[in-house]
Image (cartoon, rainbow, N blue to C red):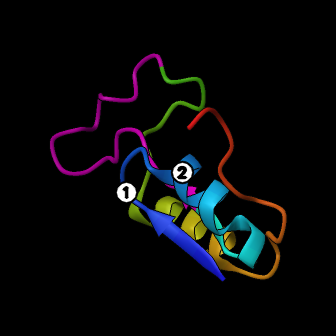
Amino acid sequence: MTALLAGGNSPIVALEYGPAGIRANVVAPGLIGGEGLENAADGYPIGRTGTPRDVAEAVAFLASRRAPYASSCGEA
């Protein structure tokens, strides 16, 4: 099971529920492009802003069985 969280509680959840097999991750995307943001990617290493699909793919991966070891880490 995976808990996808908004905010900074991921390490606490990972420590508390990890022993029960529950992984905790936070997805915090950068700038997501849209109308009026055509030039917002100036200076971005990959030359573009993110898309809703980019975020959805990251969330789908973290929630999938393909990421069994991915869980939040850091200081609680």
Query: What count of labels does the image hold?
Result: 2
| Residue under pointer 2 | 12
* The magenta stretch spans residue 16: no
Q: Compared to 75, does 52 lie above or below? A: below
| Residue under pointer 1 | 6
Residues packed near mark 2 inside 10 Å, few (<14), some (14 to 19) or many (20 plus):
some
The residue lying toward the viewer, choosing from 9 and 36, is: 9
Circle 1 — which element? Answer: loop
Place of residue 54 in the rendered image (x, y in percent of width and height, measured from the top left): 52, 60
Q: Which mark is residue 73?
A: none
Q: Residue at x 40, y 63 (%)?
A: 52
* The magenta stretch spans residue 38: yes
7 displayed left or right of 71: left
The secondary structure making up most of the magenta span is loop
Q: Amino acid at mark 2?
A: Ile
Picture quadrant where residue 63 is located:
bottom right
The residues bearing labels 2 and 1 have C-alpha atoms spaced at a distance of 13 Å
The residue lying toward the viewer, choosing from 9 and 40, is: 9
Q: Earlier in the sequence, mark 2 or mark 1?
A: 1
Circle 2 — which element? Answer: helix
Q: Residue at x 50, y 24 (%)?
A: 44
Q: Residue at x 30, y 29 (%)?
A: 40
Place of residue 21 in the rendered image (x, y in percent of width and height, measured from the top left): 75, 77
Q: Residue at x 58, y 69 (%)?
A: 57
Picture quadrant where residue 23 is located:
bottom right
Residue extent of the magenta highlight: 25-43
